[in-house]
Image: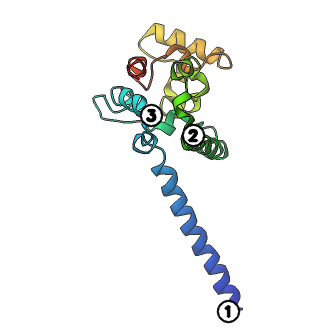
């Protein structure tokens, strides 16, 4: 009986330690410091810092990279996409294939790299369509009516990275 209690207690403690360090690792690998540690991401970091979402606002509020570039619909999708992207991006960098990436082309497909569920986790009020700006109400209602076809970045084309095209052109 005593061995069983010690065994179960050990499992509980080890599980708690694993969960704590997993949570820490997930948080540490979600921001611009980690994501821009690869030289290929420097243009993205420079343009992110100039953007409202990068802290260039009156409140100093910053979104992390994962706030926009990972789905927020459920934890399994979030963690699965994070793991998949992490392995893929590490492999590309380790193999030296990062120099072959056509970033300008990727900009044309930004809807594949920015998740509306991330936008909505901070901007949930747009679903109420109650802005003082009537045109904003009309456009957000249209988004809600055509959410399968439209994405936030369909209209907010430069969101998150102010001047990214210019930074990429410097390469």
Q: Is residue 143 positioned above or below 124 on the image?
A: above
CA separation in Å, label 1 and label 2: 48 Å
Residue labelled with disc 3:
41
Which residue bears the numbered disc 2?
89
Q: Judge whether 141 appears above or below 111 on screen.
A: above
Picture residue at 52% right of the left edge, 13% below the top: 155
Q: Position of residue 94 (x, y in %)?
A: 55, 44
> What is the secondary structure assignment of the residue under circle 3?
helix
Q: Badge 2 local density, few (<14 within 10 Å), some, or many (20+)? A: some
User: N-terminal of the two: label 1 or label 2?
Assistant: 1
Q: Which residue is mark 1?
A: 2
Mark closest to the chain's N terminus, 2 or 3? 3
Residue located 42% across and 37% down the image = 39
Position of 169 with respect to 128 (left or right) is left
Callouts 3 and 1 close, C-beta under 8 Å: no
* Identity of the residue furthest to the bottom in this view: 2
């Amino acid at each position: 009986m005593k061995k069983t209690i010690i065994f179960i207690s050990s499992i509980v403690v080890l599980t708690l330690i694993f969960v704590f360090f997993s949570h820490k690792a997930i948080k540490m690998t979600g921001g611009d410091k980690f994501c821009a540690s690869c030289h290929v991401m420097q243009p993205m970091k420079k343009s992110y810092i100039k953007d409202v979402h990068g802290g260039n606002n009156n409140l100093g509020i910053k979104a992390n990279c994962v706030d926009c570039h990972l789905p927020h619909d459920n934890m399994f999708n979030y963690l699965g996409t994070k793991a998949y992207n992490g392995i893929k991006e590490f492999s590309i960098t380790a193999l030296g294939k990062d120099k072959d990436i056509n970033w300008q082309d990727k900009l044309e497909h930004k809807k594949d790299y920015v998740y509306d569920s991330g936008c909505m986790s901070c901007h949930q009020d747009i679903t109420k369509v109650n802005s003082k700006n009537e045109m904003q109400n009309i456009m957000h209602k249209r988004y809600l009516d055509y959410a399968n076809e439209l994405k936030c970045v369909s209209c907010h084309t430069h969101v998150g990275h102010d001047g990214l095209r210019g930074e990429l052109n410097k390469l």
